[in-house]
Amino acid sequence: MNGAGVDGAAAGAGARPRAPRRAAASFVVSLFLGCAAGPAWAAPSLADRLCAVEPQTGPATYPTDAALRSAAAAAENGLAELRARGEGSAADRLALEIPEEAATRPTDAALAEYCAAAGEAMRLGAHGSQIQAVTYLLVANRLASAAGLDALATRSAYRLGLVGVSESGSAGTRGRRGARGAAASPAADIAPDPPIAPGEPACADLAGLRLDAVSVRYVSLLALECAAGRSRRSGDGRIAALSALRLSLVASALAEEPGQDRESLRTAGRELLTGALAPALALAPGEERAVLVGRLVEAELEMGAGAAPLLVDAVGRLRAESSPETDAVVAALEGRLALARGDPEQARERLRLAILAESRRPVPARLPNYYLLLARAEPVRRAAHVEAAYSALDNLRPLLPRFDPLTEETSFGLYMHDVFIAAVEEELGDGALAAEPLRIRRAQEIVEAYRQAELQSAFGSECLPPRGAARLEDLRPGEILLYPLLLPNRIELLYVAGGDGSGGAPTYRRLPPIMTGRGEVDRLVEAVVLAMSESGNTDWRAPARRLYDLLIAPIADRLGPGSTLAIVPDGALRALPFAALVAPDGRFLVQQTRLSLIPALAYAQPSGDRRGHDLRIVAASLQRQMTLPVGFFPELEGTAEEARVAVGFAQGGRLLPDFTRADLQSALDGGRIDILHLATHAVFNGRSDRAFIVANGEVVRLSELREMIDRSRLRGEPLDLIVLSACETAVGDEESSMGLAGAAVQAGARSVIGSLWQVDDVGTAELMRQFYRRYAEGGRAEALRGAQLALLDGGGPNADPAVWAAFALLGAWR
């Protein structure tokens, strides 16, 4: 899974000593909408030629200024309509290829308008790419600045800021996305985030920025700082508010990291928000103004501002111009201010009015959060208010768009996350009551709904194919389903154990809470993955030992010969190599039990019985270097041999060296296939429906692959397994760690094996040899465990967990 590096020439930084490989594309982390399959990226477009950062030999002819402006205006109108309808994924269908009729280069002003529209289409479109979006928008910003078009320069900077900074702040590994060989330059590997200080210095830095020297996160933060400063100076209240909100989220996330000056960061965040208030209040009265001002006030209160006079005055101005469309927002803000000044009675009165007003709206999206606020104001009735919030959310979920059309934050983050957490905490809050099996089962059901909603938010429910879900009642003796829930101040562990084999019901248990917060777990996971993915680094052992104590020790007495531990991971745990967690006796977890990860129980299919069944494999490999519009992909040494190893264990199958989309389609159409083994670059990033694998001269989107697989299903059994041996999960990036889970769900196979970081060819080939040797006669989890143990017990370089622990099984385990 690729992180966000930028310089393809530096691929392999941090690679292991033997035959470095598995570097993913540079500068590619897609963020927006779209599931529909479509054609591969084509040859360089007009925008590629006109909006290049470095001057290139231009075409013999150019579009005229008038044609460029007309195309840009039409595209901007189309983008506005698509956003309003929640159909941003269709942005790449906008007509940006126009006739080239002039002999002279267009003016900077016309080019800036065109590149800004083209960059936004690339950012939003289902078939766009981040490398193109960043390039076009950066060029638009520079051209607009040179032409004195301040409004366009500000808009393009804000759009550029949205490319690589998530709404969560995504603090994670600062400046180290893709550090494990994801085609990042050494500078990108260590460059810290720019200081959060909006203004002209950020714009000057942006103007002179070299894309081969920084990470995409750095570019995005710098662009947001530039947009925040310029919009405040020009009075653009909309962009001032939106950019300040994004930057304040980053500041808030960084404030929770160890070693950071927490109060300074929170102060910087409050100053950003305060500076955006006046421009936002200057907007025309209406719902957009109320929402933006309201978000600024809410964010300041959450960062400890208290009921400051400036905030009270802002809410008072909104009240003076209130309308039926804004009544709920204003009443909720008044309730928040009452809570901040310690007046719960006034807070309850205003929040009940907010709930009433919001209930009258066609889609009362804020209703669940208003109930949560009322629970704070009326703690004696907290349980009833949290239940009302969860019920409201349950009714609303099918109606909510994936992204807020104004702020582009996910509906999951805005309206769902806090409600799910509050509902789980309410079920588990009282130790005595929470020991009741019915309460535990209810909590498990809420966590399961939480995981499903998170997946649907990341990939879109339309991208997640229906399937016959596994059921808790189907768990067998020795099979344990573990739900680790990472809360801000503690870890909750829920598990369900299979029946006794005589028709008995599964057993639900809640383990005693562990008073370690989410942030500490995130740091431990990051330490394990970074150390394991670096040659000769043994610093993973201590954090791997600590994580075992936190997550596994409480259920260790249930693990042993014949057991299977299926984990539904939360947050950063999706990137954790559970197999390499270290027990007190020094043994690894894989030596104690079989393992599988499940994105959510609803997306874990029952397994089929393959014993006595001829194994049919399609193994597609790419060894050639590729340069595509989506990025540079270095040569992959050894993938052809890896594919030959896979096919060598099949009774039937096909080998596809340096494969194309047509090759893959033909092979999948050729009859029953059990396993699809893909030894090629794979880019599966979080918050993205644009995941793809790289073929010879083209890319194959995951949605296209699913369509191919679905067609083959009509001729036989479902595809049993997909092996993705050249993907990586971006360490420290919770959203990117959704990628492998998304691949497992989206591709439509019963299970997926993928790599969490790059592994050398020798180790990968041996692990696959050991895996396929065991696969035909045993379950998936048993085959992978046997392969990992074979490498571990065999000694030598392959015994290093950096080799065998890199591979994880997601989905069906039998």
Image: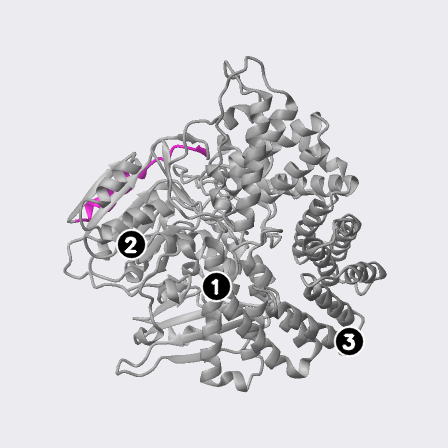
* Residue 501 drawn at (x, y percent): 27, 80
- Label 2 environment density (alpha carbons within 10 Å; few <14, some 14–19, many ≥20): many
Q: Which residue has dot 3 on it? A: 346
Q: CA distance from mark 3 to mark 2?
A: 58 Å
SS state under label 2:
strand
Please state the total of marks drawn on the protein image.
Answer: 3
Camera-nearest label, 3 or 2: 3
Check disc 1 and give the amino acid type.
Answer: Pro
Asked whether, in this view, residue 607 is left or right of residue 331, the answer is left
Residue on which the image places disc 1: 398
- Closer-to-camera residue (627/56): 56
User: Measured along the vertical axis of the image, is residue 373 above or below residue 610?
Assistant: below
**What is the CA distance from the residue labelled 1 to the residue labelled 3?**
33 Å
Are circles 1 and 3 on residues that touch, CB within 8 Å? no
Q: Amino acid at mark 3?
A: Gln
Asked whether disc 3 touches disc 2, contact meaning CB atoms under 8 Å apart, the reply is: no
Q: Secondary structure at mark 1?
A: helix
Query: Which range of residues does the magenta coloring cover?
Result: 631-650
Tell me the residue that label 2 is attached to.
Answer: 721
Residue located 37% across and 47% down the image: 703
Residue 769 appears in the figure: no
The quarter of the picture where residue 614 lies is bottom left
Q: Amino acid at mark 2?
A: Leu
Q: Are marks 2 and 1 in contact (CB under 8 Å)?
A: no
Magenta-span inclusion, residue 645: yes
Q: Nearer the viewer, residue 478 or 746?
A: 746
Residue 224 image position (x, y, % from top left)? 67, 43
